[in-house]
Structure formats: C-alpha cells, structure tokens
Image (cartoon, coloured by chain):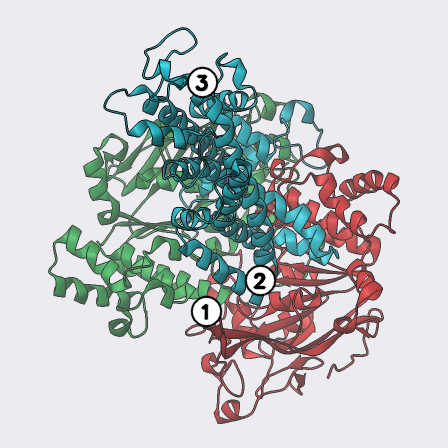
Amino acid sequence: MSDFETAAASELHSATPGLQGEPGAPGQPQTMESATKVRSAAADAWRELRRNALFWIALAIVLVILVMACWPSLFTSADPNSCSLNNQMAGPSAGAPFGYDFQGCNVWAHAVYGTRNSLLIGAGAAILAGVLAMVIGMIAGFFGGWIDAVVSRIVDIVLAIPLLLGAIVLMKRIPSDSQSLRLTALIGILGVLGWTTAARVVRSSVITAKQQDYVSAARMLGAGNGRIMWRHIMPNVLAPFLVIITIALGAFIASEATLSFLGVGLKPPSISWGSDIATARVHMREKITPLAVPSVFLALTVLAFIMLGDAIREAFDPKLR
Amino acid sequence: MTGPQTDFPAARASTPRLLEVDDLYVEFHTRDGIAKVINGVSYHLDPGETLAVLGESGSGKSVTAQTIMGILDIPPGKVTGGRILYQDRDLLKMSKEERRQIRGQEIAMIFQDALSALNPVFTVGNQISETLRKRKGLSKSDATRRAVELMDLVKIPGARARIKDYPHQFSGGMRQRVMIAMALALDPKVLIADEPTTALDVTVQAQIMDLLADLRRDLNMGMILITHDLGVVADVADRIAVMYAGRIVEHADVHALYKKPAHPYTEGLLDSIPRLDSKGAELATIKGLPPNLMKPPTGCAFNPRCKYAKDICVTDVPPLLQLGDGRTSACHFAKELLDGRL
Amino acid sequence: MAVSETASKGETILEVENLVKHFPIRQGILFKKKIGDVKAVDGVSFELRKGETLGIVGESGCGKSTVAKLLMRLETPTAGRAKLHGRDIYKMGGSELRRLRRNVQMVMQDPYTSLNPRMTVGDIIGEPYEIHTDVAPKGDRQRRVQELLELVGLNPEHINRYPHQFSGGQRQRIGIARALALRPEVIVCDEPVSALDVSIQAQVINLLEKLQDEFGLSYIFIAHDLSVVRHISDRVGVMYLGKIVEIGTEDEIYSRPTHPYTQALLSAVPVPDPEARAHREVIRLEGDVPSPANPPSGCRFRTRCWKAQERCVTEEPLLILRPAADNHLSACHFAEQRHVVA
C-alpha cells in the first residue's frame, strides 16, 4: 500500500524507514521493545477511520437501521397492517407520532416495518452482485487473454442496460400475487444487472496485484494459481471491493424504492418505503408526513451506506492521507 | 584555531554571494511526531562553480533544495530557522509573488524524473515557449524561435523538427535535455540539479553530465548538484558538501576531500564503494542504519555507526571545525582523522 | 555454441544455449493482429560453473532482465535451451519442475515491491516451506525461518513484523532469506543492490559473498553498475540489444576489453577520483540505443560505433575467440584491446 510516492514527497518518503523507528541494525544492540508498534495496513486504516466523524455517524445510522430491520417491534408497538379508515389522515397520537395516512395506517409503524424489506433487498442484491463480481472479475483479471476479452465485452453489454429500465421490463413479467416471489425476483434482477461496476474494480485490482514483484516471487517458489490468488491477490482486492459493494448496497435500496414507487417493485400488502412514498404522493397536498417519513428513512439509509463506503475507501487509500 | 582564510560559513566576504544558505532548520510534522530533517545547514554558491551536495536518502539534501526553490510541501514541512540569501536578499522573507519571480528567472531546478516533470499532453516546444511568452512577454514566433535555440543549446538533434513532438516521443536522455532546456529558458543564474542522471544509463549519464558542465561554464551559472553518486561528484564538482541526518558533516574542495576525508562518514562512504579499476578485497562497510529523525541519537548523529566513536560523541554535538582553505568538518576528532592519528 | 574454456573453477551446472525471447507487438481490441516483435533477447549463450559468479552488465533495454525471467521460467523462450545439470529446464514438468524451483532462486531488485506488504516476515520467509511441504516438517518451520533471519543478519525475534517496518537494506536481506530457504544451487540476482543507499550496498554485497562461500552458491549477477559487477563477479558478460557482445573473466573484460561497446561503457563510468578527470580516456557515444523492435542489420552496435565499416552492416559479428582478445569471446569484426580503466 505504501508504494505510492509522489515526486514532491519522495524525500520525506525515503526518509520514512528512519522516521518509523528502525529496529536496530544487525550486530547492534537491539532496543526493539521500545522502538516500534506493530502496524499493518488494516491497522493503519483503522487509525484513520477512528478519527473520522462521518464514519461514526454513518456507522450509527446503519446499526440503528439494522436493529430496526431485525426487531421492528422495539421501535413501535403498533401493528403496521391494522389500518382503519376511522383513522384516515388523523393527526399524531400516542403510538403514532406522525399520525395516519389516507388508508388510516400508522405512518411511523409503516416506515419502521418497511425497513426490513428495503434492507433485505438491498443486502440480498449486494451479496449476489458481490459474488458475481468477485468470481467473474477475479477470473478475467487473473487469467487475462481471451477470457478477459470475452468477460470485458459481457460487462460492457450489461453496463449498457440501464439498471432501472431493465428492472422495470423484467419485473413486469413477474406475477404480482406472490409477494415473496416478487421479493426474490427483485433481489435477483438488481443483483444480475448491478454487478458490473464491482467486477471492473475487482478485475483492475487483480491486474495491478498480479504484476507485483511478490507475486512473481511466489511463482518462482513454485506456488500454484490457487495459492497466488488466495494469499497474494485476494487481500489486495478486498478493500476496494468492500467499498464498492457498500456503496452499491445503498444504490440497490434506492432502486428498490424507485421500482416500488413506479408500481413494479413490491406491492401492498408488502410494506416498503418505495410503495409508501408512491401511495402518499397522491395526497401530499393534504398531509406531508406520510410522504416525508419514509423519504427521510430512505435518504438517511442510502446516505449512510455511501458515506460508510467513502470513509473506508479514504482510510485504505494512502494517497488521500 | 582557524587559518587566515575562513570563508565558510561565518565570515562573509565583501562581495555578496550568489546564493547562501545560512543555518537552515526544517522540520516535518507527521502524525507519528516531528522529524527534524534539516538541522542547521549552511552552504554558499558563487557564479560559475559547481557545488555537490552528497548524501543518502533521508539526509535532507533534496529538502534543502526544495526549500531554496520554495517548493517544499508546507505542511508537513516547516522552516523553523535560518536564512536563504540570494544576492543578499532573504528568500524566506519574500512575498509569494517575489519568490515566484525568483523561481525560474534566477534559480531553476531540474529533477531526476523528467517524464513526470513534463506535461504529457503538450508538445515540448509548446511547453518551452509558453514559459517564454508568459514570463518574458515574447511574441509567439519569437518564443518558438528561442525554444529552438534552447533545444539546440542542449544538443537535441533536429531541434526544429522535434519541437512538435510530445514528451513520450523522446528517450530518457533526450527528455532530460528537454527539461534542462526548459530550466534554462529564463536565463537563471543558479541551476539546482537534483539527481539529474540517477534514472539514466551510464553512457547517457556521461552525455548529460558533460552537457551540464559545458552549460555551466558557457553561461557562467552556479550549479548545485544533488547526488548520492561519489563518482559523478568526482567528475564535475568544485566543492562538495556531505550531508548526514540533516547536517553538513563535511565541506571541502573536491580534491582535498577525496584525498583525505575529514569526517568518519565520508571516509566510510569512500571505503564502501567497489572500484572499477580493481576487483578489490572485501568491502568495508558502515555498520548499522541511518538514524531515526524522530529520535536522533544524542551528541553526534553518526555516533552509533562510527568506528571511532568515543564518550564525547554521545554527549556533545560536534561543532563545525574550521580546517583551513574553507574546509569544515562536524567531527570532534576531525584534525586527528586528517593527521592519521585516529 | 558454448565454447568450453579449460580454466574452470568447478563443474558446469547451468548451460544456456542460444536463448531467444521475442515479445509480439499487437494491435487491435478484440482480435489482436501481430505487427512486429520486440527482440528482447536474441541468441544468448553462456555457462555457469559451480561456486562462481557470472556478472551480466548492460544498459536498460539490453535484455538482461529478460534473461533473468527466462532462467526463472517466468517467461517461456521463443527458442533456445537452458540446461541445469544437463536437463533442459523448459521441458520440465511436475516433480522435476518442483525440484527446479528448489534449485534455482532469485533475488529481485526492488525490496519494496518484492515482499507482500500484508504478510509478516515469518510468513514471507516460511512460504517456500508451505509450498514445498516435504522440505521441512511443520513444527520445524519457525525454527528454520529464525535461523534464516539470523543468517542474513536480522534479529530472529522480528519474525512477526511486517515489511514496512524494515529499511530497504533490511528488506533486501529478507528477500535473500526467502531465496535461501530451499537451499538452492543457483541464485539469479537481478539488480539486487541498485535500489539501496551507498552505505547499505556494501553490507548486502558482503552478505551475498559470505553466503556464496558458506553454501557454495553460484550466482548470476545482473546489474548496470559496472564497479559492483567487477567486485563480485568471476566472469562478466556484456549485453547490448539482446546479445552478448563480449564475455570473459572479470580481468579480461575490465583490463583488456576488446569490444568498442565494452570500452565505451567502461569509459563512461564516473570514477570516484577527481585526479583522474584530466588523464582519463573519454569515449562518448552519440545518440541512443536503437529500438529492439527494429535492430540494425549486421552488428547491432554499428550505428553508434566509431569503428563501423561496410562489413559491419552486412555481416553479423559472431561471439567467438578473436586473436586480439587473448583468451575471451568478443563479437566485433575489429576487436582489439584498449585500456580504458585507469
């Protein structure tokens, strides 16, 4: 990681062996215990992250959202599905801090319970896209040649399909009666259409790592492809990969909301922020909270994931320090 | 204790020096602490002479040059003391605009890596003439004519045609010539060459060093040659300043220094390089490693590696001993070393 | 091809015969069309004897690093053979290839990129044992790694540190320890000291010499620094544009060079002796090395050679014994001894 040197800083850099506190030279009395702390690239990144306020804010939001998705009842005692027209557009009350929407559903409870589906789809699509990107990017980058040429063209083609447009067309063909099927389909479609950017990142990281002298050194020792990929290349790919997948997770959550808003994602009675926003939009002149609450949830969650990804990227990138 | 003629560094001659660095201190503030990179460096340069600043990585030789040029990164760098006098004016007290004027027109610099010093998307002619138009107010055609002259001056064959080429179309040696031409565009009086031939092959290095020596003589420039190569220094330098851990440990006429070093570090360096004219026996080495500039050794910074080190070397920072003829050494036992009594 | 010389130090263990490596130049995106070849190595032959050091010198682009990669089987040759104990290494597979890996190892140039920054020193030096599990039983590996650390002059307690905690010279020691782990017979050293500071170079050179004596290693020592090569080598080959132009004992090449390129190369090396400035013979080559994609016909050096005649254009000079070169091989039609090193 520390191989990046800028011309201006090179003198400083070349001085760093001295700056870092040398372990004593051969034949010299060693005072190693007092000299240095062991620090790896990951430890360096952690030092950097710890000082970043944005990282802590993003992490806090993500943790709250995570807890909300797993145990929504911790945040509201109301049942999101017990809607009553008696409460149509009613104002705030106990257990319903933001009142009720046009269907007479509890706005707060609905948003809280919507978290699970949004996060499920976002995480599911991110995992699927991540696995595809890792496997395909690794193979293309490592083996190169015609395999790389073919994979790169496939990536270009998939990249040319707009994510939302493709998803709309495909989701139209999924029967609307089974909500669990629609959820799985959403994950599948977003994942299959959304792996390409990450695959490119993986591929280029693999190519960079592959050319490192220490990979040649391992090869000269007789190490096989598996060992080289696992021990020497994978660790270099992991950091940029995790960053891009974290950011993608945010984007997938936003995509789900957009699709549900357009009526091709999850449909009632499934609760999701996107469909909540869609139904509330019609009545936004009369009452703003049924639109605002899920919108804020959505915006905060997406932002938190993107901020988290950015913070980690900055921490791992020595050039930005 | 000093000879009648001590021109370095304290006693000032009546005529102003071309360039004089006086007791310079520079620190780097990093997250791991403060590194004292330059610790009281003084040297001077007269017109038409070559001063070699010799040192290993981390010795502070390039940082001194960057401070003179005003291209030191601040932060992390910080000048904490001293003066840099150019024709008796202190560069460190000047405004940014004044320093910009000095840079290029009075003091120019060339670097080790010509490729990254040139802009890849403009032709070399464009890059040379742009400086001339901006800084000297030449017309477009005058600037182009001057650019061709400059490329002729640095002996680029077919300069008139090559002016339209991009940096990547030049070989390493030719790129270095282009960078020298750019540095000479504004007729500087001081040329700082920071490891100008380190990235080049020996036959090309010889060509470039010849060129620099010719230019220095023909244009009567003062040249500061920063290098780690004892061979290059012996070939071209008049005087030599050896740096170690941010200090000049020895300063001398080049003939005197190679004949008999007055500092154990210089002696160690000269003994540790293999020779071209004989296979030689086992190489002498300087034990250990360069010091940690965050926690430099007490006393003399070289004491943990010095084969002559005594108690005083650990307790007292050695002063600059005047050894006559402008020669100085920062060793408690410089005179004994010179007389062969160590 | 290889002419056997009678004065042998030991038995021949590696024989390289007419090794050729051409890299295709391709154009196009999906269907790449071959438009030419870079003739990086173009018919190189030499032999290596047990316990000796063969130096290979030349400027960048002469193909010396490609020779190293070919010997390590990081690249497959376009033609030619390299026989280790009589067996062609390019025909090896399976267990024989694994034995080759144990027998021939390499020390690389850049101590910063040749060690995986995410692995501890123990894991780096221990990796050979993980790959060749039969060399050392699992429980024995840590002890062996610590022995190796001690052998190369590092503190065995530093086994759990990461490469960035060491200086350049110490990292190069780690690289040497890794190369030694499998107790090879041959170590290819590709510019092993050129990234190091002068005072550290000598330490590493001495270490390599000590290890050679201790384990009877044979070295192929590739470098551009002619002084370093003379110091460490028993025999030296000079490469230019993919070919060996002259090869002989260290004394023959440095004291009695016969090829004009060798003479020019030696004359270009700056000597750390300012007194030599005046009376050194100077041969300055004009221009740059031609592109290896399109080398000159006949003798490849003729475009820069002051002796070139019609014959050099039409007839390629072979690397053979020449009358003027008492007992060594030279690839010049007009080979004659000339004393260039003071």
- Which color is chain A depicted in? cyan
- Seen from the viewer's position, the closer of residues A82 and B115 is A82
For disc 1, the marked residue is: C29
Check the image and report above or below for C253 versus C130: below
For disc 2, the marked residue is: A144
Q: Do dots 1 and 2 share one subunit?
A: no
Chain at numbered mark 1: C
Q: Is residue C275 visible?
A: no
- Supply the letter of whichever chain is red: C
- Supply the letter of whichever chain is green: B
Q: Is residue A110 visible?
A: yes
Amino acid at dot 2: Gly
Q: Quick one: label 2 or label 3, which is nearer the N terminus?
A: 3
The residues tagged by marks 3 and 1 sit, at their Cα atoms, a distance apart of 55 Å
Give the residue displayed 78% in from the left and 56% down from the top: C212
Q: Secondary structure at mark 1?
A: loop
Mark 1 neighbour class, 10 Å CA radius: few under 14, some 14 to 19, many 20 or more: few
Mark 2 neighbour class, 10 Å CA radius: few under 14, some 14 to 19, many 20 or more: some
Q: Do dots 2 and 3 share one subunit?
A: yes
Q: Secondary structure at mark 2?
A: loop
- Which percent across, then down, holds residue B309? 63, 30
Give the residue displayed 53% in from the left and 26% down from the top: A47
- Seen from the viewer's position, the closer of residues C102 and B258 is C102
Residue A109 shows which numbered tag?
Answer: 3
Asked where in the image residue C249 lies, by quadrant, the reply is bottom right
Give the residue displayed 67% in from the left and 75% down from the top: C247
Amino acid at dot 3: Ala
The residues tagged by marks 1 and 2 sit, at their Cα atoms, a distance apart of 13 Å
